[in-house]
Image (cartoon, rainbow, N blue to C red):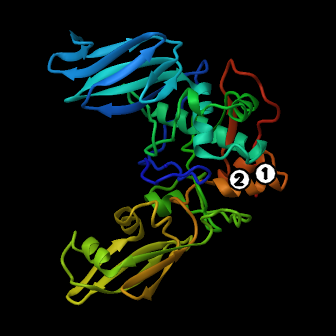
Amino acid sequence: MAGADGRALARGAGVVLALAMVAPAAAPAEAPRVRVRLLHSGAPVTVTTGSVQQTVAPHASGLRVDGRVASGRLRLPPPGPHRLAGRRYRGAIEFIRVGRGLDVVNEIPLEAYVAGTLLREVDGTWGDEALRAQAVAIRSYALHRQARSRGGHFELEADTTAQVYGGLDAEAPQAWAAVDATRGVYLAWGDAPILAAFHGTAGGRTASAEEVWGEPLPYLVSRTVPGEEASPDTYWRLQVGAGELAGIAAAQRSVGPIEAVRVLAHAPSGRVARLALVGRRGSVELSGRELRRALGATRLRSTLFRVRTAPGGFVFVGSGYGHGVGMSQWGARALGRQGADYRRILATFYPGAELRRLPGTARAANFAVEAGAR
């Protein structure tokens, strides 16, 4: 979701990305590997492979490895596992000098990446079909990012900027079962992997890509989402003091103590598009997304809210968690429990997208997704 939504287990804030249509391209000739930036650091990083421990730090001439000056790139080959920052990772690990710091990049087979990400996005108890749908969404998003990487030294981030990847320690039997059942399967539009955006809870209706990011995508349109009542984010309240809102307004100009919060416009899905913070010395307008960013995405869980006055400030009463585009994870859970298979779940949230299979991977039956399925 390029990401700034916070995420808790089984909530999944989703994927946010600066949007651009991917030029149609043939599916990869073989199951790819992906390159994931685990962290950027200006401080030394310790990595252990087997019984060998090394400390890598940025240096004016490149890298310093255990006190020895080396070139600006160090590769620890596969298969691993490599341990760093308390986690284990399969594949290769690379240390790359960037500016005054270094990037730590994990190069890993795509299917292992999906297995190491799945249970960081949804709960393993949600049922086979919801897990399979999420696995396909994760794989599709990774391929979409890879197609747009423009030759950089990584394609994905390991945090909410992209998808939350936890490495080998995040894998589990439920994750690998979903990966194996959908091996190589991804969503495409015009031969290109789609931007398979997802979020925690829609609050009853998803938002379109055009509404949220200003860029229409034919498979990311507003959809009704029943069955989210079990989500802890279906209904929420947030109390915010007038002083905190005054501080947010002051980023544009000082308007004094905030006396009212007025919603000026709603987006088609019902989310707040524009609002005004009204103070004693004037008012400041901002978008619902700007207010959410200022308050924190884990506090103001979505822009689907109403505002009430309260002693000393205001109460935001809302529904949903995340940007609201694409697949509602709690909605997918509900559909799975109602008997929908993963194909029907994906057709619901990405209408018109087609399921494809990467060449050389195990074939699954019946990849067709009915474009109009609900």
The three-letter code of the residue at mark 1 reads Gly
Circles 2 and 1: CB distance less than 8 Å?
A: yes
In the image, residue 159 above or below residue 78: below
In the image, residue 244 above or below residue 68: below
Q: Which residue is mark 1?
A: 336
- How many numbered marks does the figure carry? 2
Residue in the picture at 58% in, 49% down: 9
Q: Position of residue 324 (x, y in %)?
A: 55, 60
The one nearer the camera, 256 or 26, is: 256
Residue in the picture at 77% in, 44% down: 129
In the image, residue 164 above or below residue 310: above
Determine whether the residue tagged by mark 2 lies in a helix, strand or loop: helix
Determine whether the residue tagged by mark 1 lies in a helix, strand or loop: helix
Residue in the picture at 70% in, 28% down: 183
Q: Does 188 sit left or right of 47 as displayed?
A: right
Q: Which residue is mark 2?
A: 332
Q: Position of residue 281 (x, y in %)?
A: 20, 88
Distance (Cα) linking label 2 and label 1 = 6 Å
The one nearer the camera, 122 or 209, is: 122
Asked whether the viewer can see residue 290, the reply is yes
The one nearer the camera, 102 or 220, is: 102
The three-letter code of the residue at mark 2 reads Ala
Asked whether the viewer can see residue 372, the reply is no
